Amino acid sequence: MIEIHQAQLEALIASFFWPFVRILALMSAAPILGHVSVPMRVKIGLSALFAVLIAPTLPDSAAISVGSAQGAVTLIEQVLIGVSMGLVLTVIFAAVALAGEVIGMQMGLNFAGYFDPQSQEQTTPLGSWLTLLTMLTFLAVNGHLMILQALGESFSVFPIGGGGLSATDWHRIALIGGEMFRIGVYAALPVIGAMLVCNIGMGVLARIAPQLNVLAISFSITLLVGLLVFMSGVPYIAAYLQEEVVRSVGLFLR
């Protein structure tokens, strides 16, 4: 008969619990997997499955008891690490939404904005389209598998009970927030440039032909020019987003 002592049971629970907390925090904040349309039961089930698979390969963390004071500190550390990794990856999708808002504003499509029940915010048709393009790009480059790889390597970079994120790591995370604006502006730059030239042309036309109702035709012209420039630049935008997705996944790997 196999006997399991209380200390062995606590060690077994701790070896599973700590990776489970980090993985669940990542699942709750990561793109696609952390989307509100994914049921919480699915997130918890996948987190438990990955924790069972990863736990035997990790260094011994059973010395940290789940119910101890050190366990409470470790719990906060694992949640912060998982959420930070997920937020870093979500920056790409936030940047795409920002690019869609900028492009829609330049083309006058903000009037066609609507409330997205999944993201719980106001969005535009181009913003939704770019978000779907980013999701497809993310899956096409195996971003979901890269997340799992980064997650597995994160236990070596940030071991359980090793102190969590350092001040340098928090500084890097703060700088990553600024990357959202850089990526969004770069993705929208072709349309912004085309709209600038188009608006300058409309201004010149209004000066040389005052009898022409420029305001009545400017909306149609800017919309047509913007769509043409946007569709011609989609392959370059997709390639740029692919590079940024790959780079964002590796930010937590040293």
Image: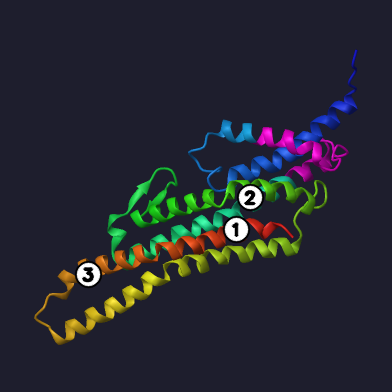
Q: Position of residue 117 (x, y in %)?
A: 40, 43
Q: Nearer the viewer, residue 243 or 39?
A: 243
Q: Nearer the viewer, residue 101 or 74?
A: 101
Q: The N terminus is located in which quarter?
A: top right
User: What residue do we see at 73% from left, 33% from top?
Assistant: 52
| Identity, as a three-letter code, of the amino acid under mark 3 | Ile
Above or below: residue 87 compared with residue 13 = below
Side of 30 relative to 78 (left or right): left
Q: Nearer the viewer, mark 3 or mark 1?
A: 1
Which image quarter: residue 165? bottom right
| Identity, as a three-letter code, of the amino acid under mark 2 | Met
Mark 1 and mark 2 residues within 8 Å of each other at the beta carbon? yes
Residue range in magenta is: 47-76
Mark 3 and mark 1 residues within 8 Å of each other at the beta carbon? no
Q: The C terminus is located in which quarter?
A: bottom right
User: What residue do we see at 75% from left, 39% from top?
Assistant: 54
Q: Position of residue 75 (x, y in %)?
A: 75, 42
Write down the residue under mark 1.
246
